[in-house]
Image (cartoon, rainbow, N blue to C red):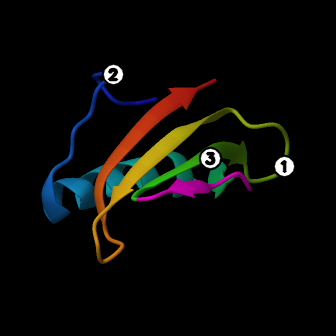
Amino acid sequence: MGFPEQVLEARGYRELESRVTRAHEEFVAPGEFTFRARPDAVRLRDVVRFTWEMVPVGGGEAVGGGDEFVVLDAAGRITADYQFPWL
């Protein structure tokens, strides 16, 4: 999906902003795709699991997506984010 390695680690605000910016520029900004969460989020203590899809803006089936697990701190902020892409 445009990244040179299967495992991409981002630590801190700058690295996270860079990753989000790159994904937006590659997939969203050209106007071809949009991302959406699927309605299956569940939370168990400090872990939230949900799935997401990348779909064509004009409609149609998902062309990408994945499972996402986020770990929250006591204030509800994300401390870790694990993505497992599919499709």
Q: Is residue 39 magenta?
A: yes
Q: Is residue 65 magenta?
A: no
**Is 46 drawn above or below residue 86 in the view shown?**
below
- Secondary structure at badge 1 equals loop
Classify residue 8 as left or right of residue 67. left
Residue 36: x and y, percent? 66, 55
* Label 1 environment density (alpha carbons within 10 Å; few <14, some 14–19, many ≥20): few
Q: Which mark is residue 59?
A: 1
Residue 5: x and y, percent? 28, 22
- Residue at image position (35%, 48%) is 81
**Residue 31 shows in this picture:** no
The residue labelled by disc 3 is: 52
The residue labelled by disc 2 is: 6
**Is 26 drawn above or below residue 6 in the view shown?**
below
In magenta, the rendered stretch is 38-45
Which amino acid, mark 1?
Gly
Picture quadrant where residue 62 is located: top right
Sequence order check, earlier mark of 2 and 1: 2
